[in-house]
């Protein structure tokens, strides 16, 4: 169970958890740029959103070379420059894998990992990355090669902590084994999808890693791409991410036959949230935070009022007692 730290020198209180077994303390709620930066937010609005999060105690801002083909990192870098934050007051990440169309611009080869890191540093306008993730597993590159590349960047001071995203438990275990055997820097964290409808990795597959390695996690899509906000219960509202040209797949998924049952469960969850006097969005975010193997929950709000509502989740944790968690499990009926 992670130790919680609360600092009251912000406008709103925020709890912090250790990132796995590292000494790094990350805010329970963090802010990411997938979908939103470039496609929905420019530099000025991104800076306003980041400042709002920062003023509420958020200290981790997530990014990747793949987000808007690097544009999301450029926007975040310009926003950070505009805000003038001290480098010792925030945590920023990037991810490597989907860099471009040429053979040397993708995957987890030693070369691409190094090149992608240098590119992210330039776009984000920082001298080092706090967190650097392997965005997906690469079956065409030996895990040892990937671990050695990350170790090199850590030794060079360009990366503080490295980790994985959507890797299998067996591949992560292999990375730990190689790190010990070869005296290399092991991974510190994984970034999996985790929400009420996606539970397998966090609640079953990674359990041994949590016990043996104290693996940290920076979970994404806590609201299931907005499904758990309740705003899609009556169709697809204009201005939502389902209307974005590059994210048609989200709309197609929501309208698929497979999602009929999920929409019905959202309606039941919405009713439960109403009975508790809590917006569904906060119920869903608090539910994620109740899992003590979660280091931080990445938010992806595109509007200030959405972000403000999301950030209120830290004040409602006490509502989700054992009885409420049981009621949620009864509705979901999907516990691994």
Image: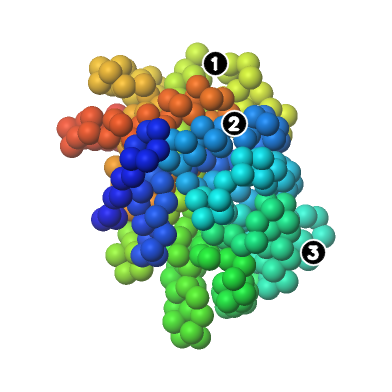
* Residue 123 picture location, percent across and down: 72, 52
Nearer to the camera, 295 or 154? 154
* Residue 216 picture location, percent across and down: 40, 58
Mark-to-mark CA distance, 3 and 2: 37 Å
Q: On screen, 49 above or below 122? A: above
Q: Mark 3 vs mark 2: which is more N-terminal?
A: 2
Task: In the displayed orientation, state which residue is furthest to the left.
Answer: 323
Say which residue label 2 marks: 48
Q: On screen, 214 above or below 33? A: below
Task: In the displayed orientation, state which residue is furthest to the bottom.
Answer: 182
Q: Total of numbered circles in the picture?
A: 3
In what element is the residue under mark 1?
Answer: loop
Circle 1 Cα neighbour tier, 10 Å, few/some/many (<14 / 14–19 / ≥20):
few
Nearer to the camera, 223 or 15? 15
In what element is the residue under mark 3?
Answer: helix
The residue drawn where x is 48% and y is 84% is 183
The residue drawn where x is 79% and y is 64% is 103
Q: On screen, 211 above or below 184? A: above
Q: Is residue 140 among the parts visible in the rendering?
A: no
Which of discs 3 and 2 lies nearer the camera? The answer is 2
Which image quarter: residue 75? Answer: top right
Q: Mark 3 vs mark 1: which is more N-terminal?
A: 3
Say which residue label 1 marks: 235
Circle 2 Cα neighbour tier, 10 Å, few/some/many (<14 / 14–19 / ≥20):
some
């Amino acid at each position: 169970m992670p130790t919680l730290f609360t600092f009251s020198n912000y406008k709103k209180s925020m709890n912090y958890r250790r990132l796995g077994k590292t000494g790094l303390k990350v805010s329970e709620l963090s802010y990411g740029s997938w979908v939103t930066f470039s496609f929905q937010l420019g530099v000025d609005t991104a800076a306003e959103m980041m400042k709002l999060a920062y003023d509420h105690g958020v200290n981790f801002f997530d990014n990747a070379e793949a987000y808007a083909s690097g544009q999301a990192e450029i926007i975040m870098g310009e926003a950070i420059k505009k805000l003038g934050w001290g480098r010792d007051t925030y945590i920023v990440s990037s991810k490597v894998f989907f860099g471009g169309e040429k053979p040397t611009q993708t995957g987890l080869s030693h070369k691409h990992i190094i090149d992608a890191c240098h590119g992210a540093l330039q776009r984000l306008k920082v001298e080092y990355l706090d967190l650097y993730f392997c965005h997906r597993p690469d079956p065409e590159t030996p895990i040892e090669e990937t671990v050695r590349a990350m170790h090199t960047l850590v030794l060079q001071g360009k990366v503080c902590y490295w980790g994985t995203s959507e890797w299998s438990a067996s591949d992560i275990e292999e990375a730990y084994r190689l790190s010990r055997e070869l005296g290399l820097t092991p991974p510190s964290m994984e970034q999996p999808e985790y929400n009420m409808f996606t539970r397998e990795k966090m609640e079953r597959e990674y359990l041994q890693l949590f016990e043996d390695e104290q693996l940290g996690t920076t979970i994404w899509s806590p609201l299931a791409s907005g499904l758990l906000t309740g705003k899609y219960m009556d169709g697809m509202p204009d201005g939502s991410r389902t209307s974005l040209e590059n994210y048609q797949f989200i709309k197609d998924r929501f309208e698929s036959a497979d999602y009929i049952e999920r929409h019905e469960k959202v309606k039941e969850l919405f009713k439960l949230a109403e009975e508790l006097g809590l917006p569904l969005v906060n119920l869903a975010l608090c539910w994620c935070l109740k899992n003590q193997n979660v280091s931080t929950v990445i938010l992806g709000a595109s509007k200030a009022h959405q972000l403000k509502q999301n950030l209120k989740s830290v004040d409602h944790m006490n509502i989700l007692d054992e009885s409420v968690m049981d009621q949620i499990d009864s509705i979901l009926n999907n516990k691994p």
